[in-house]
Image (cartoon, rainbow, N blue to C red):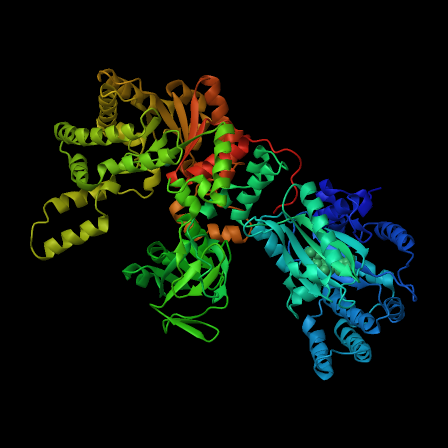
């Protein structure tokens, strides 16, 4: 028979799946001999069985009773005893912490008889009646969904009547009678007097709180699976509300904001935990406890040091002091800011608590990303107007505008303020420095699109009352009009009036070579972990860089070469005219003239890039986009021609161009004439590019450089495409003296290429996965359209947990990658394989690419540090266990 209940002494922190985070850590503290009130945990198995069948599994409550009896014996205090009753706390707690999402019921076991026993034992009648009324209220709300207001209303009346001294025992006793009437009226029967019945109902209510709407939403947002269920912790109550020598608090073993060592937290005398949340009185800094109760403070500090050494990480704790005696009610590995994560990881290495390998697993790329953004100088910031959801990091200051057109027209930095955004707002989002919405969460349209383009965004700032028609918004009684300056913090979600000064990120300055590691504790920690990541990683990190300036920046940020050098910009600017001539060319002679004119300028470009990356590989992609992208838009040309005709003028060249654009028009250009297809139908184009590159390399070699170019053919579907183009490439290469050997490889960016990788490998020296196109073609998702139109909805409805353009879809696209790697290497064992495209800079994707054995990832220069860190994490071995740090 399945067992469902475990005494705290039986569990430990490794059993988080079974006991939930809270239960496993209560068990761990019990094992460590720390003062935890006795108790037991009803497992997540029981919750899943309950949710599946709609009733408790057979035998559950017998097991609960058996464990309960042990506690009764240990404490010499039975549940329901009218002279000295045991009271219980019934607390939820799943695998991952979901703060405030689920239920806890305190003071189970109180009834008309035991309330007198509690009063007698504690000598505090007022406290006993107050506890009873708390129970009726919490039980009513949690078990039967009676809104707290119905009780709070009555409490307020009694409080007002009592004045500053607070209600006495007589008044509270009367209040309990009122509460019972409220309960009976709202629920339809009397408050249950039998303590065991209270306990069973409370356990069921905690099970059911797993599926409460807010809990479901929270899980969706945090990517926590829905089928885990919660455990239920049942433990003896201790009382922080028994006078001035009692109290309750929370504490951290280090500062969770900066990582500085020390004792941080809040304390509230003469109170229970829920009073802190209710905010009836203000807490005091934990340091005050040293004055109020030095013995308990000393004990708490000792316990926190035990916990930190044991968990080898920052811990937070909840504790209660009952008449001078300290009790531990909860601990877990604590949440922290990105800065604290890096600082603490480095400190723990210095303190000998963790290895440097493990330290890499204590930080992640998302945290490093946040540290690279500039931030508001909070020491001089005014109090925020309001706080929404920090949806896309950064610190943006700008003038308020209410619509996309105004954002586009503005000549100063602007913040686009909308109720929510939709695809029509896209031009405004591009033009603005920041986006602020009143509605929507982290997966709303505004959030997804802003993150995609690196625009600062705060969404769901529900306190905003927007009146776009009148061109103003208000928060409370403060009104802001179009043109007023505000500041938004995309990391914290804060919205400030006026222009808050922005402090550049020390980490970004360090990465740009402007700060040395010694200058700042955080920077020193980042430097140390990045250095270690570089030392252990097996995956190389290259950059996507198209220009000499990008190449130089990439090199400074630690790139081991260029994994993707796009050539399209070499056809733009003044050269566009040559491209137009190429497209309009009347026959092979004119075409070859134009190509001859393009050759020297492109050769000069390549010389500079090869020089910037001297000694490192530079993978040059032959021209990829559809040719019409180099011509003026159809609508512009049509307008020009129409105007000329209306004025009876000769539209001349514009008419020829218009005809060409019409001829080349494609319904699905991304699936049309581009990539290798273009090279095959436009004779001489690829040959010109190859010659320019080979001659540039030859020149660099003659000048004493060490050029390492590689040629990459885009959008290949079939080995015959590659073989045909390669024959042409080899022919050109053979005619360029002094050029070093130049490997020729292919992109793998269509399902067919991946499925026939074994054939392609026979014609390719290397593969580079173009995961953007591979994702588009595998999913049949047009990236430019779907991200704005429905990915947000998919995320909100839980169909996608992340955009496949952000993190590689391991199950689908990833399967093609695995297959292509295996078949490619089988056909050519020394095949070099990399990935270029956005996924190359995404930490989760990098972990996947490392696992499938790619040689390198290539990403945009500013994501290089993140890629280095992620590749390091993939190679570093964490030692010991990892506690819940979500
Ligand atoms: P959450 O997961 O929302 O933090 P908890 O289960 O930790 O909920 O309970 C909330 C508060 O209830 C705790 O912070 C603590 O102050 C109080 N509490 C929990 N267990 C006990 C107990 N055994 N005795 C007294 N108070 C308790
Ligand atoms: Mg808690
Ligand atoms: Mg592509």
Image quarter where ligand 2 lies:
bottom right
Image x and y of residue 762, in percent: 40, 18
Determine whether 398 is above or below 305 in the image. below
The quadrant of the image that shows the N terminus is top right
Tell me which corner region of the image, top left, top right, bottom left or bottom right, holds residue 828. Answer: top left
Residue 846 shows in the view: no
Image x and y of residue 300, in percent: 72, 53
**Would residue 825 be found to the left or right of residue 642 on screen?**
right
Q: Nearer the viewer, residue 34 or 665?
A: 34
Q: Nearer the viewer, residue 303 or 128?
A: 303
Residue 350 shows in the view: yes
**Would residue 642 be found to the left or right of residue 866 on screen?**
left
Tell me which corner region of the image, top left, top right, bottom left or bottom right, holds residue 691. Answer: top left
**Would residue 848 be found to the left or right of residue 210 on screen?**
left
Q: Hey, which residue is sitting farthest bottom in the picture?
A: 161
**Would residue 534 be found to the left or right of residue 120 on screen?**
left
Image x and y of residue 173, in percent: 82, 77
Question: How many numbered circles are shown?
Answer: 0
Q: Nearer the viewer, residue 76 or 575?
A: 76
Q: Hey, which residue is sitting farthest left in the picture?
A: 649
Image x and y of residue 744, in percent: 34, 22
Q: Residue at x 44, y 41 (%)?
A: 780
Determine whether 825 is above or below 560 in the image. above
């Amino acid at each position: 028979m399945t067992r469902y209940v475990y005494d705290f002494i039986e569990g430990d922190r490794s059993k988080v799946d079974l006991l939930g985070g809270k239960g496993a850590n209560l068990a761990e503290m019990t094992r460590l001999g720390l003062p935890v009130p006795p108790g037991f945990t009803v497992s997540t198995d029981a919750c899943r069985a309950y949710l599946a069948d709609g009733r408790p599994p057979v035998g559950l409550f017998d097991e609960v009773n058996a464990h309960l009896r042990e506690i009764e014996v240990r404490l010499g205090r039975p549940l329901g005893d009218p002279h000295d009753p045991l009271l219980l706390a019934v607390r939820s707690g799943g695998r991952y912490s979901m703060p405030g999402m689920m239920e806890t019921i305190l003071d189970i076991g109180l009834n008309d008889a035991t309330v007198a026993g509690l009063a007698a034992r504690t000598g505090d009648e007022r406290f006993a009646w107050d506890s009873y009324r708390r129970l009726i209220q919490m039980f009513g709300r949690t078990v039967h969904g009676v809104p707290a207001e119905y009780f709070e209303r009555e409490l307020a009346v009694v409080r007002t009547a009592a004045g500053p001294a607070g209600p006495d025992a007589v008044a509270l006793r009367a209040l309990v009678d009122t509460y019972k009437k409220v309960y009976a009226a709202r629920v339809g029967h009397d408050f249950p007097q039998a303590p065991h019945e209270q306990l069973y109902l409370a356990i069921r209510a905690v099970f059911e709180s797993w599926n409460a709407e807010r809990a479901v939403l929270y899980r969706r947002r945090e990517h926590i699976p829905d089928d885990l269920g919660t455990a239920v912790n049942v433990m003896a109550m201790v009382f922080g509300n028994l006078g001035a020598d009692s109290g309750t608090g929370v504490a951290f073993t280090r500062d969770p904001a900066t990582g500085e060592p020390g004792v941080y937290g809040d304390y509230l005398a003469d109170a229970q935990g829920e009073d802190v949340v209710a905010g009836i009185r203000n807490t005091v800094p934990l340091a005050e406890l040293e004055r109020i109760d030095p013995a308990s403070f000393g004990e708490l500090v000792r316990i926190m040091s035990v916990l930190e050494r044991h968990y080898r990480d920052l811990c937070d704790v909840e504790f209660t002091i009952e008449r001078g005696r300290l009790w531990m009610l909860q601990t877990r590995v604590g949440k922290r800011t990105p800065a604290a994560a890096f600082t603490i990881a480095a400190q723990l290495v210095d303190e000998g608590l963790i290895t440097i390998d493990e330290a890499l697993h204590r930080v992640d790329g998302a945290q490093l990303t946040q540290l690279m953004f500039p931030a508001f100088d909070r020491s001089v910031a005014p109090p925020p107007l309001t706080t929404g959801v920090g949806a896309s990091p950064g610190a943006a200051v700008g003038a308020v505008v209410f619509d996309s057109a105004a954002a586009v027209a503005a000549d100063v930095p602007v913040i686009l303020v909308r109720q929510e955004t939709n695809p029509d707002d896209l031009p405004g989002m591009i033009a603005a420095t920041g986006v602020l919405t009143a509605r929507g969460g982290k997966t709303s349209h505004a959030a997804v699109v802003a993150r995609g383009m690196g625009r600062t965004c705060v969404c769901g700032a529900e306190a905003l009352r927007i009146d776009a028609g009148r061109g103003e918004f208000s928060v409370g009684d403060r009104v802001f009009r179009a043109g007023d300056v505000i500041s938004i913090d995309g990391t914290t979600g804060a919205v400030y009036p006026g222009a808050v000064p922005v402090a550049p990120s020390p980490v970004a300055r360090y990465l740009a070579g402007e700060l040395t590691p010694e200058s700042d504790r955080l920077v020193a920690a980042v430097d140390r972990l990045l250095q270690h990541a570089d030392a252990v990683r097996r995956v190389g990190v290259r950059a996507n860089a198209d220009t000499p300036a990008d190449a130089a920046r990439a090199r400074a940020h630690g790139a081991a070469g260029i994994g993707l050098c796009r050539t399209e910009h070499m056809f733009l600017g003044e050269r566009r005219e040559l491209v137009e001539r190429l497209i309009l060319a009347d026959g092979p002679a004119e075409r070859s003239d134009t190509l001859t004119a393009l050759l020297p300028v492109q050769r000069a470009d390549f010389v500079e890039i090869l020089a910037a990356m001297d000694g490192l590989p530079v993978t040059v992609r032959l021209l990829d986009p559809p040719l019409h992208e180099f011509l003026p838009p159809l609508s512009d040309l049509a307008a020009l021609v129409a105007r000329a005709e209306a004025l009876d003028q000769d539209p001349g060249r514009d008419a020829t161009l218009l005809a060409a654009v019409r001829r080349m028009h494609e319904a699905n250009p991304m699936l049309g004439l581009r990539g290798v297809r273009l090279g095959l139908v436009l004779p001489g184009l690829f040959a010109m590019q190859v010659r320019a590159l080979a001659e540039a390399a030859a020149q660099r070699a003659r000048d004493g450089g060490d050029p390492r170019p590689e040629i990459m053919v885009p959008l290949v579907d079939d080995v015959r495409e590659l073989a045909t183009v390669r024959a042409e490439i080899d022919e050109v290469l053979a005619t360029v003296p002094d050029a070093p050997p130049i490997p020729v490889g292919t992109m793998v960016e269509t399902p067919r290429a991946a499925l026939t990788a074994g054939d392609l490998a026979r014609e390719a020296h290397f593969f580079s996965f173009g995961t953007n196109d591979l994702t588009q073609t595998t999913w049949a998702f047009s990236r430019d359209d779907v991200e704005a139109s429905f990915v947000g909805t998919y995320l909100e409805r839980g169909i996608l947990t992340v955009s496949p353009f952000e993190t590689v879809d391991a199950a689908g696209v990833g399967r093609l990658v695995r297959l292509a790697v295996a078949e490619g290497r089988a056909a050519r064992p020394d095949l070099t394989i990399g990935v270029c495209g956005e996924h190359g800079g995404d930490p989760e994707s990098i972990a996947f690419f490392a696992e499938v054995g790619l040689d390198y990832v290539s990403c945009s220069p500013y994501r290089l540090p993140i890629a280095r860190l992620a590749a390091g994490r993939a190679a570093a071995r964490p030692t010991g266990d990892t506690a819940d740090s979500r």
